[in-house]
Amino acid sequence: MIGVFDSGLGGLSVLAALMDALPQADFVYYADTAHMPYGNKTEEFITRRVLEIGELLVAQGCTLVVVACNTATAASVQILRATHPGIPIVGIEPGIKPAALASATRRIAVLATEATSRSDRLARLIREHAENVEVRVVPCPGWATHVEMLQLNDPALATDVRARIEPLLAQGVDRIVLGCTHYSFIAPLLADIIGTRAQLVDVAEAVARQAQRLAGDFAHGSGRLQLQASSCPQNLPAALPRLGLDRIIPRVA
Ligand code: DGL
């Protein structure tokens, strides 16, 4: 069984890519809805939750874990790996490398939570993969919570998104990296604002390919999916159609 987790609904964008790549695998998805958002929490808090969720997934029999959250990966993927050395753990990090490689203007931006924006791991990623590229790191407080509350068409969100994106485009940014899995669900809003002036970079499918490579025998199960949450688990299946994920069907048996 493959365990996938996030602070809330955002990681469902990664789960969808994983289920496409591994249609026969068994999945359990855990949303830490009692503690969402992670983006305004300390590294210590996030690490404690990541280790607790890791224990919970391993105790349920997960033999591969996907951290479908940039914030949790930046804060804690290393300690999670060290705690479970026998279990492959796939994290998600903003697609700085593909964006830097593809940028014609040599200017890219990454949209992320506050915690990811200030993380050492993001700074290192930029140093390693975007040496000759200008990178604007844009913290986007509140965006993940709007997605979590399914307020995708809220005019206040649209105003805030436009206010953060227009200056980037005016500065010649031509690749905009989605550095938080919740932001995949506002990609249509972002695309409306951006038009043909830039392209969005989302690495959900690349993460799914990495999990596919590591899955081995775990790729062959009976296509089961359980959705779990630390608060209000009934909201997860209800959210799927609202997020355009009607094709994800929780199947326990
Ligand atoms: N979805 C998460 C990420 O990828 C975190 C959102 C949040 O809880 O702040 O960073």
Image (cartoon, grey):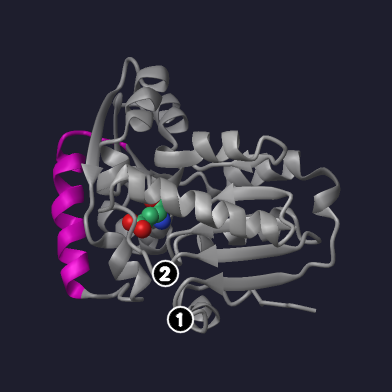
Does the segment drawn in magenta span residue 236? no
Residue 105 in picture, x, y percent from top left? 29, 26
Horizontal side of residue 63 vs 247, given as left or right = right
Residue drawn at (76%, 63%), measured in percent from left and top? 26
Residue drawn at (51%, 44%), measured in percent from left and top? 203
Residue 218 in picture, x, y percent from top left? 81, 51
Residue type at the position of mark 1:
Cys
Residue 196 in picture, x, y percent from top left? 33, 48
Range of residues picked out in magenta = 155-174
Quadrant occupied by the N terminus: bottom right
Give the number of the disc on residue 33. 2
Q: CA distance from mark 1 to mark 2?
A: 8 Å
Give the number of the disc on residue 232. 1
Quadrant occupied by the C terminus: bottom right
Q: Which of disc 2 and disc 1 is earlier in sequence? A: 2
Q: Is residue 8 something that shows in the picture?
A: yes
Q: Specify the principal SS of the magenta part.
A: helix
Residue drawn at (15%, 64%), measured in percent from left and top? 159
Q: Which of 225/200 is in front? A: 225
Considering the numbered disc 1 on the image, is that residue within a helix, a strand or a loop? loop
Q: Is residue 126 above or below residue 89?
A: above
Tag 1 near tag 2, CB within 8 Å = yes
